[in-house]
Image: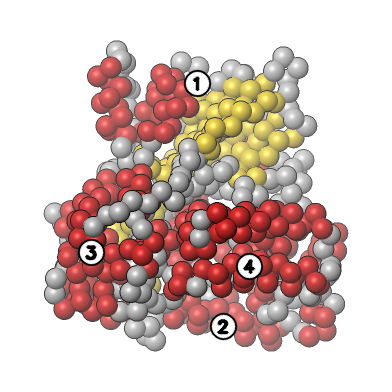
Amino acid sequence: MCGIVGVFGQKDLELVQNMLNSIMHRGPDDSAIFSGEIYTVGAARLHFTDIKAKQPFTRNKSTIVYNGEIYNYKNLKQKIESTHNIKFETDSDTEVILIGYELYGVDFFKELDGMYSFAICMSNKLILSRDRCGIKPLYYTILNNEVIYFASEVKALFKNQNIENKIRLGALVESHIFGFVIGNNTFFENIYQLDPGSTLDITLNSEHKITILKSTIENNFTEHKKVNFGDAILELKHLLQESVKSKLIGNYEIGSLLSGGLDSSILTVLLHNTTEYNIKTFSISDQFNKDIEYSRNLSSHIKSNHQEIIINPNDVLRQIAPCIMHNEMPTKLNINFLASKTISQQVKGVISGDGADELFGGYSLFDDPIGVLNKYQANYFNLKRLNFLDEQHFQTSRDRLSKLYHISQETSAIECVFDFFSKDQLFNWQFHITDRSSMCNGLEVRLPFISNAILEFANKLSFNMKIEKGTKPLLRALFKNILSNSIGDDISSRPKMAAPASSYLCNNFITEFARDNISNAYKENHPLRNLFKSSISFLSFDLFVYIFTIHRGQIPEDFTIQNFYSSYNIKEVNNEIFAN
């Protein structure tokens, strides 16, 4: 796992080193940069597989920088060795990607099963590619159609003073309507994220101008087949066992995030069954949360080395600004962000149940899909009635709403909502939060529910099998199958819980701080007073402006949250907001 940065179209060692320095938290074990004729790239590496496989990695005048894990790379390596007279220098997935591209071009990327983003640089060509679900991030911007800059995090791009750090107001509209930014957009003008499953083939022509060809690995979640419920349980059990096993690649122990909920409990038991040692499990909670009892019971049953990470709400104020800095958007405090440092001191990687809710019907709102669509539509028209943003800022939201309603009319409302959650929300929100909450402390999170085989399996299930008789009936039956005792019965039959109580306590504490420090007069004169309803919304957005438009993605060393709403800071913030 790594953080990657680069520039293509010119060499710039000093800039790329500065870019890399800004994301060293993603790869604290090793770092290096490399320059070719018209490019400079860098990588900060978190060691898991072959330590000898340095990055950037060069072969036959092609150089790759790569962030992620390819879980089937050994099989791909054997396939290449058996059909081509090629000797590998390392036992790394990095080299497999590069050689696979040399042999088969971008079609080889369809064979990759894992989470990744990478750049391959040649004398006049740049390849940027991202995994089919967008688990690992990759951002880019183009200046004067001559030079392209890319990085695992946006803040690295802002090390180039010529790259504008202007807030994209359309992102505020999209976040207000849907809860997150739509498509390949970001919170910044002219800075984009590479679409999930996409590859950009970028060349420089004779006039030193950039041309781009885009190819995409499609995920289709709407082709359903009749599958017997009992057979589905057994097939999913096998697929998850294989997926968990594949997540153990590397030279270091993998732990498990054990919330006490259904998804994490399934994965934890399967991890326990797969390994020959007592696994390490981690629960993030507090004394007010009932989840802690479920995780304690399960960890005791499987005899895991269990650690309970208790979040103290009185210690969260100093973390809200770093949380926004790492997430690169206005956001609430995430408890996984608070706990990742402690976990990273015990293990280098963990498995997590991300994706199970979206793929297997884990939200009660799936029972009322028309209500979900109507809510998005109401959010859109309520925001337009405020009449404080130009029409252009609504374009992306309007297009996405139109597409949602078109899908609902062509198929069904439930199919439309499932499609939206299993693509837009999962790819553009959940994976973003997971990556930033862990990689800020060099902790790798692996996702067994997200494998090529499980995506295809979930695709063929009927909606009734996912939402009939409550949420996730298939996963509940599966857990009873793999743990047929009272603990399995208790966890599989409990209702789905929202975020742990710690999450609410932390954000309630921050809300109280915001209420005490943000006056009504300030809110009434705020440029976006019509958009924000809660004090914490004002606080998170103001911090976002302060960090990214005033300080270009950095928090000043003398910053304290207690002094943030001093007259000087707020004057700066308001000037920036009005400028936008």
How many other residues sit within 10 Å of disc 3, few (<14), some (14-19) or many (≥20)? many
Does any portion of residue 461 appear in the rendered image? yes
- At a point 50% along the width and 73% down the height, the residue shown is 368
Q: Which residue is mark 1?
A: 62
Residue displayed at 27% across by 20% down: 81
- Crowd around label 4: few <14 · some 14–19 · many ≥20 (10 Å): some
Of labels 4 and 2, earlier in sequence is 4
How far separated are the C-alphas under marks 2 and 1? 51 Å
- Image quarter of the C terminus: bottom right
Question: How is the rendered protein coloured?
Answer: secondary structure
- The disc placed on residue 577 is none
Q: Amino acid at mark 2?
A: Phe
Q: Which residue is mark 3?
A: 478
How much space separates mark 4 and mark 3, taking CA atoms? 33 Å
Q: With respect to residue 507, does 344 lie above or below?
A: above
Q: Identify the element where label 1 is drawn.
A: strand
Q: Which mark is in front, 4 or 2?
A: 4
The amino acid type, in three-letter code, at marker 3 is Leu
- Separation of marks 3 and 1 at Cα, in angstroms: 46 Å
Residue 34, position as x, y percentages in the image: 54, 28
Disc 2 designates what residue?
509
Q: Are marks 3 and 2 in contact (CB under 8 Å)?
A: no
Percent position (x, y) of residue 21? 57, 44
Element under disc 3:
helix
Judge whether residue 331 can be spotted in this image. no
Question: Front-most of 541 and 546?
Answer: 541
Question: Left of 101 or right of it: where is 119?
Answer: right
Amino acid type, residue under disc 1 in the picture: Ser
